[in-house]
Amino acid sequence: MSPRHSLLLPRFDAPGGDLPVRESLSAVIGTLRSRGAAVLVAPPGSGKTSLLPLALADEWPGRVIVAEPRRIATRAAARRMAELVGEEVGGRVGYAMRGDRRVSGATRIEVVTTGLLLRRLQQDPELAGVDAVVIDEVHERALDTDLALAFCLDILSTIRPDLQLVATSATADSARLAELLGRGDPAPIITAGSSTYPVELIFAPAAVPTPLLADARVDPRLLDQVAAVTRRAMAEAPGDVLVFLPGEAEIASVASRLGPLDDGGGPDVQRLYGRQSAADQDRVLQPSGRRRVVLATAVAESSLTVPGVSIVVDAGLSREPRMDHVRGLEALTTTKVSRSSATQRAGRAGRQGPGRAYRCWSEADDRHLPAHQSPEILTTDLTGFALAVAEWGHPRGDGLDLLDAPPSPALDAALATLASLDAVDESGRITLRGRELARIGAPPRLARALLDGAQLVGSDRAAEIVAVLSSDIPTAGDDLVAGWRAVRNSREPTAGRWREEVRRLTTQLATSSRRTALDDDLAAGVVVGLAFPDRLARLRSTGHTAGRHYLMTGGTGAQLSGSTGLTGSTWLAVASADRPSGRADARIRLAAPLDQATALQVASPLRHTDDNIRWSEGTLTLRRTDSLGAIVLTDQPLTDPDPEQVATALLAGLRAEGLGILSIPAAADTLRRRLALLHRVIGPPWPDVSDTGLLASVEQWIGPDLRKVRRAADVGRIDMTSALRRLLPWPAAARLDQLVPERVPTPSGSPVRLDYGAIDHDGDGQVVLAIKVQQAFGWTSAPVIADGRVPVVVHLLSPAGRPAAITSDLASFWTNGYPQVRAELRSRYPRHAWPDDPCQTGPGRQ
């Protein structure tokens, strides 16, 4: 580094100037001058966030942009660098984030959130006036960080080869990062030492294991353990205590358990989390005259220092975003902390001297922790990502250097959402509407709600509601309208952030729309419904209790909490919901009431009329439904069904359930058996009428009749005999009665019906002629059918119609069997003739 430029970087012997990263700055500068990109690996507290940008500003005359993943880290980094140069924030060091900007014409180093950097890159890809960009905390793998890195690499490879790019990480697992920055030839990984002091690890598991509950909530017994370990730590060692917990609810719970500590003269229990006001966050980051217990989320893991901390208590849990792409629901899921995060957390105890880190899990469990947290790109909603890469000109992210490729199912779901907003075309390229949504600087769904909602509820209220949803403003309970009114009337610092966001959103609207006559409830319902039409929900009227169970248009059940003012609302517009593991219904986190007319208006593309024509459970269903998504509004009998749809449903029923769904009378069944016999003994052109054969030719023989069905009862009225006759081959059909006659003449001159009932549908079995013995007198041989191929089996009956003999060889029967039959029957029926030689005798009395 050239000393002539050392205008910002403090002297080595100045306060803060001796941090370990200083020894690596020359290597970083040298790598940038030769390669244009560098990877700096440095643990928390090494000075990478503060000294590196100052050194870059000394080396290059243009502005240095530092991108941080969190708002709190953005302010803290700017404040620390401003202190090092002896100025207030807004001079040579400033910061900018959505709704909060402190920069001036003198600003050389600007710390920004990664989200803001992404918007600037979209608006000014050349980054005019900027010489260097630092992407900080890449190891956290936030989605915006991954995307900002990819965009900067794209710029570096195309329009700004002179841009200096540094990616910093607190973990040594940076090979993939170096590969990307080197663009084919991995960039050198420069590693800085640590200024941390030794930290003693103390494992303090609960006596009884406390796993996560079924819906990923934290077991209260674990929070009892955290509070107990905190008290133990305070008794065993001096210094402030930093307690890591997964979220605000757990912070509040542990704070209540530690309540007696804050007695005015004892330790001060403070809280640190992302949704706090800037003033409350900044207060925690300042030295205190009292001993403190700071209950914090993962925001305290890296990028900032909580002064005075020499003890860390780690609950061992983390919150990660998880997207249910099938149901369109996103939630923060509680998971075990990774080893890398646990290491960083423990390191916070050794920033200012030797420290202790108490882990609320066992040493055995520690060995089974995952190595790293999951990258957000693999777990979160990708709708914003998909719109950003489409706006950048790389649909689906193709051609961009990403640390991990987005999962195809998640990306497909995101593009489907954008297509429904008319934000991308069929190829995934951004549309004019998409550019309009991107310009808003809010998630795409909320951007759509702002633009379209302003026309329906007025610009001011649309902006206010979207600001509640997009600014991470805490609301008490699940009633959005109540939360909106509370923040609108509040003078709390978080309300100030909300008002800044309202002003910003209002300026994004091209024209101002006047307030409408809708009340606040409906106004909120309209805006939420425009953002999340797939989450409009209607109360389920049966099978549930207490008016808390709903069905959403997306098809997922949803449930209100036990105590809420929304209970019993017929319709809800759900702004936030999640579905915990093991539960069928989603939990409604935030919603607004609305009426059916409004629901139909805001979600009109989801409305559809369907003719439900299907064969199910042995009957034909013919219904017409009017639905909003999965919610059925009306369900009525269908009186004018489409013949083709009916035929398709019946054919599907036949193939699924078989021919048994048809009513086949005796005459049709006899015809089928006659045809089966001909198919077996003669073959083509006689048709195969087995179940398999008929199902294979179903369209040919019964298709025309299926198209005449208009109601379920019509199925039983189909003329099956006529249907089967459609299979008869022409001209052979004319010989049907000759080959397999229904009746045959007898010696008496009266035809007798043949019985084909013993012939199965494959053509196997016997054809039977039942005739009294006297009627057969004079018959020397049994009839033969099917061109002489099939002998008829004659059942000879007594005068009373009882079986006497069965034969298919009458000549043999008259000689061998008849004498015995004659002897048995002559005494019973003396009035009937019983000649000695029936072949020479005409038929007798009946």
Image (spheres, rainbow, N blue to C red):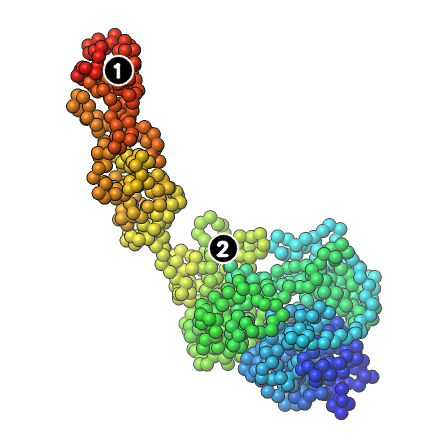
**Three-letter amino acid code at the position of disc 1:** Trp
Q: Position of residue 833 (x, y in %)?
A: 19, 11
* Residue neighbourhood size for the residue with mark 1, other residues' Cα within 10 Å, grouped as few (<14), some (14–19), many (≥20): some
Please give left or right for residue 3 compared with residue 131 in the image: right
Q: Is residue 621 visible?
A: no
Classify residue 215 by image quadrant.
Answer: bottom right
Residue positioned 66% across, 90% down in the render: 106
The answer to which of 805 and 626 lies nearer the viewer is 805
Q: What's the CA distance linking mark 1 and mark 2?
A: 81 Å
Camera-near label (1 vs 2) is 1
Q: Position of residue 646 (x, y in %)?
A: 32, 50
* Whether label 1 touches label 2, CB < 8 Å: no
* Residue neighbourhood size for the residue with mark 2, other residues' Cα within 10 Å, grouped as few (<14), some (14–19), many (≥20): many
Residue named by callout 1: 814
Checking the image for residue 557, the label placed there is 2
The answer to which of 70 and 387 lies nearer the viewer is 387
Label 1 sits on a secondary structure element that is helix
Q: Earlier in the sequence, mark 1 or mark 2?
A: 2
Please give left or right for residue 563 compared with residue 694 in the image: right
